[in-house]
Image (cartoon, rainbow, N blue to C red):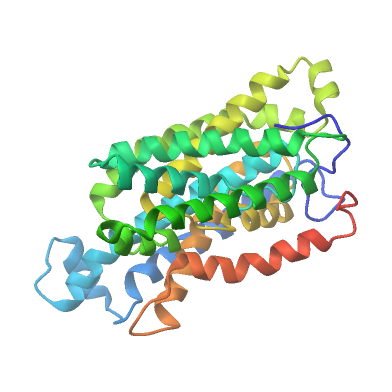
Amino acid sequence: MSSTTAVEAPTTGGAAALRRPRRVLALWLVVVLLVTVGVALASVLVGSRDVAWADVVAALGGSTDGFAEAAVAKRIPRTLLALLVGAALGVSGAVMQGVTRNPLADPGILGVSTGASLGVVVGLAFFGMATAATVVWVAIVSAGVTAVLVYVVGSLGRGGATPLKLALAGATTSAALSSLVSAVVLPRNDIAGGVRSWLVGGVGGGTYASIRQVLPFLLVGVVVCLLSARGLNSLALGDDLAAGLGENVALTRGTAAVGAVVLCGASVAVTGPIGFVGLVVPHACRLLVGVDHRWLLPFSALVGAALLTAADVLGRVVARPAEVDVGIITALVGAPFFIYLVRRRKLREL
């Protein structure tokens, strides 16, 4: 999804090498793994009511007799869902930035998440979608159609798909589709309550059943993206040079884009649209490991999982005994970061 226009490759730090030394990578890998495990444990232990280790052990053993054990039993699938969706959104954002060579790319900013949301809402309102698998498929197809539409619109005119044109096309498409979502939902009182909550974006409704439904799609999407990592490194050099190195530019771009769309659509189907994770995470990971996608994508998965889980924990803490949906927390973090990226002097096209 990239033009041959000279667009700055998405980096955060400017002079970063393609890849850091292996010792540095190993160190950061250990740090990120420890942080991810730490926030996962915090997600199980922290909530409207904190629990003790004994309660966690009892809940893992199948006990739900006490309030604390029941709370832990509810938080475990919620934590697993946050980890999975955070990883999926992190990888999806990194791939979208690599495919478009656009540092502003993100499933939410490009309107892909909103397109998936519209497809699900229309299916629920007019076609009576009854199974979770159908919801996932509809979300993925809708996300794919929206991604193609945004790229086509952003590619029109002189210069092709520049960062500014893609961002504007995505923002415009997202606004239009959001209006359509509201137009569909408002007259339908039978679905409005549940859909409004889902549209905010959250993992509070995570269950083992919902994880089983979405897990195969997330695994396929991640595998496709990881297999495209070497090709994404070539695309970062520009279409002409990548083709000169023997890369099938169209096939590489299309394959990677499909993986990113699958991850985005499947995530939206189970949690609703959660913004800015796919924007923030890849930039943070480039500071740690450089721009080699063979390392960037796995790190984006880990950091995305940690970020979304931490945001969920924060949402439970700041409004006790109520909760703030994770989609609101990520927006509060991601919106200032997006403004910073837009204002960077290196993005001269803006």
Q: Residue at x 52, y 55 (%)?
A: 179
Image coordinates for residue 208, horizontal then vertical, percent: 25, 51
Write the residue at 77% across / 65% down: 340
Quadrant of the image occupied by residue 228: top right
Query: Which of 333 and 246 lies nearest the eye of the viewer?
Result: 333
Is residue 310 among the parts visible in the rendering?
no
Residue 31 x %, y %: 58, 60
How many numbered circles does the render carry? 0
Residue 255 seen anywhere in this rendered image of the structure: yes
User: What percent of the width, then of the height, locates residue 75?
Assistant: 29, 66
Q: Is residue 33 left or right of residue 67?
A: right
Q: Is residue 62 left or right of residue 73?
A: left
Q: Position of residue 272 (x, y in %)?
A: 42, 55
Q: Is residue 333 above or below residue 121?
A: below
Q: Quadrant of the N terminus?
A: top right
Residue positioned 37% across, 54% down in the render: 81
* Residue positioned most to the front: 187
- The residue lying at 81 percent from left, 25 percent from top is 239
